[in-house]
Image (tube, coloured by chain):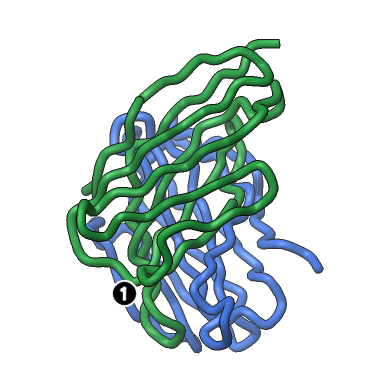
Chain colours: A green, B blue
Amino acid sequence: SQQGEEDPQALSIQEGENATMNCSYKTSINNLQWYRQNSGRGLVHLILIRSNEREKHSGRLRVTLDTSKKSSSLLITASRAADTASYFCATGGGWPGSARQLTFGSGTQLTVLP
Amino acid sequence: KAGVTQTPRYLIKTRGQQVTLSCSPISGHRSVSWYQQTPGQGLQFLFEYFSETQRNKGNFPGRFSGRQFSNSRSEMNVSTLELGDSALYLCASSRQDGPSGNTIYFGEGSWLTVV
């Protein structure tokens, strides 16, 4: 079963614009991870944010986490055509030493138009 | 360093046959987990192995099984294949200690088509 929902399901923007994707989850978490998946390919790890963090940056990516609302957002700034992909949030990574079982959202399909 | 390596990348099987997929984790990673991705069900957890022991299992029938070897490499097996088993099978690995212990890395996946 899916942990939560991602919003929107699909997003189409022009190159250079910012893209924001949202993820909601249902249970308490230790951390939340964002992944990118190009069509037919594997998942590429983008960023991990821990439950005691509120915001994290990596290059053009900014992730926020609101544990009170059980939600996270991924912002991609100055988007490029190469950012076209599906983006997933995942929870359940656990602490080091604990079992690994990620539960994924349904994903957002981002299309960046040149 | 090398990422998670999965073989084969593509395969076609007939209903009733069995299939074995292989995964080599990132060097130093001791946890290996498997996921199934389909258009209808999305990404679903199959099972996780650590130190050759299955530590966690998803809600899949007994036809799905796996194992892990002493070098942390893992295989998963699906017996008596059904059309609905057609999917992208993804393997993931992670460390179990240190500040990066939470991060889970995925391979490119194995595309299985059952005809």
Q: Which residue bears the numbered disc 1? A: B56
Foreground residue among A81 and B79:
A81
**Residue drawn at 42 percent across, 34 percent down:** A21
Q: Pinpoint residue B66: horizontal percent, then vertical percent.
A: 43, 69
Q: Amino acid at mark 1?
A: Asn
Q: Residue furthest front?
A: A54
The outermost residue toward the right is B1
Left/right of residue A24 with respect to residue A60 in the rendered view: left
Quarter of the image for residue A54 reads bottom left
Chain of the residue under label 1: B
Percent of width and height locating residue B52? 48, 86
State whether residue B23 is above or below residue B52.
Answer: above
Q: Position of residue B102 (x, y in %)?
A: 49, 73
Badge 1 crowding class, 10 Å Cα cut-off, few under 14, some 14 to 19, many 20 or more, is: some
> Is residue B82 shown to the viewer in this render?
no
Q: Is residue A109 left or right of residue A113?
A: left
Residue at 29% in and 69% down: B57
Q: Nearer the viewer, residue A66 or B111?
A: A66
| Residue pictured at 45% horizontal, 19% vertical | A11
The percent coordinates of residue B113 (x first, y second) are: 49, 34
